[in-house]
Amino acid sequence: MAQRVLVVDDDRTVADVVCRYLEHAGYAVSHVGDGASALASVARQPPQLVVLDLMLPVLDGLEVCRRLRERPDDVPIVMLTARGDEADRILGLQLGADDYLSKPFSPRELVLRVRSVLRRAGGEPVDVPPEVLADDGLVVDTGPRVARLHGRELTLTLREFDLLVHLMRHPARAFRRAELLERVWGWSFGDQSTVTVHVRRLREKIEADPANPRRIVTVWGVGYRYESGDA
């Protein structure tokens, strides 16, 4: 059965192109033109992924993103933003969007991003077979994609989970943001602030004191490193 994708965009021309390319790629696509209709559509028949424009009538995309993240099914979100709207893009990532594209964009690239996010959402192995990573009360099982801290299950987005797994698999190794962008997101180019935002969100969820992180530390002039508490 084809995976369902909901496209939320009030620009009919953009929406028609996006829907056509996604349908050609084999997805079952539906479209709505405002935020309230998007939430109603997801509640009625949850899709496997939402392509969400930030500039929407009734409810804007940021509010839609926030409300979708309150749902237990944690539907993946790919945002569409106007070029130059960096503050909104960063806020969208902070709210839990899994990926983004700036307008104007290549519809082919959008299809690739959608495919990548859905692949990760489906739990397909990216680098190695499923494993359990454990460190000082933090346990990550890559098979069912579950992370727990001192027995409490964490609510992580797809990219947050993948970023945490990658860092835990390589403790004590410093990664540049460009490296993480390529290894975790699969992007050979893109806005490196995406990595910064996701690291900040991860710290808020796994660090006792996010302002003074012990697990994911900043390597000044380089990037980030995971410090094992069991070392």
Image: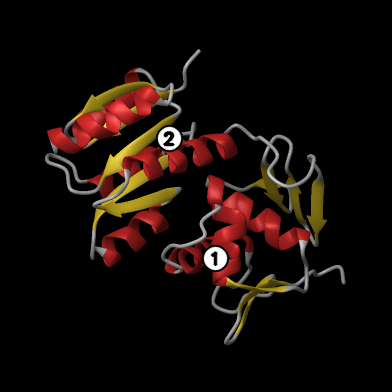
Q: At 74% across and 36% down in the image, what residue appears?
A: 143
Reading the chain from its start, which is encountered first: label 1 or label 2?
2
Q: At 32% across and 46% down in the image, what residue appears?
A: 106
Q: Residue 207, image x and y in percent?
A: 63, 67
Q: At 57% across and 66% down in the image, what residue appears?
A: 203
Q: Vertically, is 171 above or below 205?
A: below
Instruction: Provide the residue designation for mark 1.
Output: 199
Secondary structure beneath dot 1 equals helix
CA neighbours of label 1 inside 10 A, class few (<14), some (14 to 19), many (20+):
some
Q: Amino acid at mark 1?
A: Val
User: From the viewer's perspective, is 171 left or right of 196?
Assistant: right
**For the view shown, which residue lies furthest in the bottom direction?**
221
Instruction: Provide the residue designation for mark 2.
Output: 71
Residue 46 lies in what quarter of the image? top left
Q: Residue 182, image x and y in percent?
A: 57, 60
Q: Residue 208, image x and y in percent?
A: 63, 68
> Which one is nearer the viewer's eye here, 185 or 208?
185
The circle drawn on residue 23 is none
Q: Amino acid at mark 2?
A: Arg
Residue 38 lies in what quarter of the image? top left
Cα distance in 3D space between marks 1 and 2:
22 Å
**For the view shown, which residue lies furthest in the right direction?**
231
